[in-house]
Image: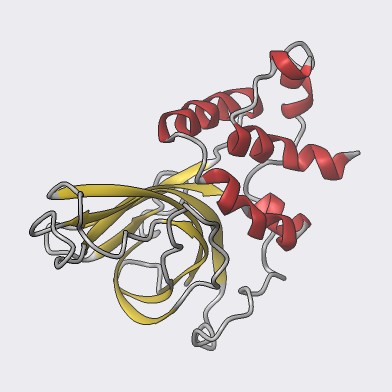
Amino acid sequence: MMNWLILLPLFVLSTNASFSNWGLSSVLPSILKHLPVANCNISALSLPSCSLPAPTAGLHLQYVTLGRGTQNYTCSSSSSSATPVAVGATAILFDASCVASLDTTILHNLPDLLKRVPLSGAEITTQLLDWLTGQTMKLGKHFFTAEGAPFFDLRHAGANDDFARAAKVAQVDAPAQFALGETRDVAWLQLKGVEGGIKEVYRVQTAGGGPPATCEGMPSSFTVDYAAEYWFYA
């Protein structure tokens, strides 16, 4: 029974499910107070198999998170001769350690579900789960600095040096699995920390976030929803 209960908070988050619709409104608080939904042991986990370089020897996995946010783009014109230019991203980072330690196959399917949840719904649901469980599922945030550097801030629930101003080291295309009419998945990345206690970051199992092929009919700036796993090493 405990196995599926560990997944319940992420199920609620990924589907924006209503407690009352499932008849759980009266029992969830008492269940969740005793349920591990964050800060589970991830020491035995390995990065998903891919052609990115392996984590540097001597580093240890610190966090496994699910990121939900937007990839941001600009267009110089709205014609088919122009192509979108990536100008950064923003995302909320949620603790995925418990579902990852339970079953990584389930974890790898969550980004595709999470990208369908409105950003406001994801934040509200997480705040509710934090209150119900007394644990913290929102670990931090991802954004780009004014200088264009990717930044990961995990100090919300971690140590003072749990952050990284990072630089991209390698990237590979995401597996081609998008459906007709859906956005393409952004690339999988390896990044190195150039400032902060986090030394390497991997973005894998991406869902959405890719731009259209051209700027035809697009505004000068726009965003595309995405979700992904982020693995942090130090």
- Residue lying farthest to the left in this orientation: 76
Task: Work out whether 66 lies above or below 174.
Answer: above
Coordinates of residue 229 in the picture (x, y in percent) = 53, 60
Residue located 56% across and 53% down the image: 111
Question: Which one is in front, 173 or 67?
Answer: 173
In screen coordinates, is 201 left or right of 14?
left
Task: Work out whether 132 lies above or below 45.
Answer: above
The image quarter containing residue 170 is bottom left
Question: Which one is in front, 233 or 229?
Answer: 229
Residue 71 visible, this angle: yes
Residue located 63% across and 79% down the image: 49
Coordinates of residue 21 in the picture (x, y in percent) = 72, 16
Coordinates of residue 42 in the picture (x, y in percent) = 67, 63
In screen coordinates, is 63 left or right of 7?
left
Coordinates of residue 222 in the picture (x, y in percent) = 23, 47
In screen coordinates, is 104 left or right of 158?
right
Residue 143 visible, this angle: no
In screen coordinates, is 55 left or right of 83?
right
The image quarter containing residue 173 is bottom left
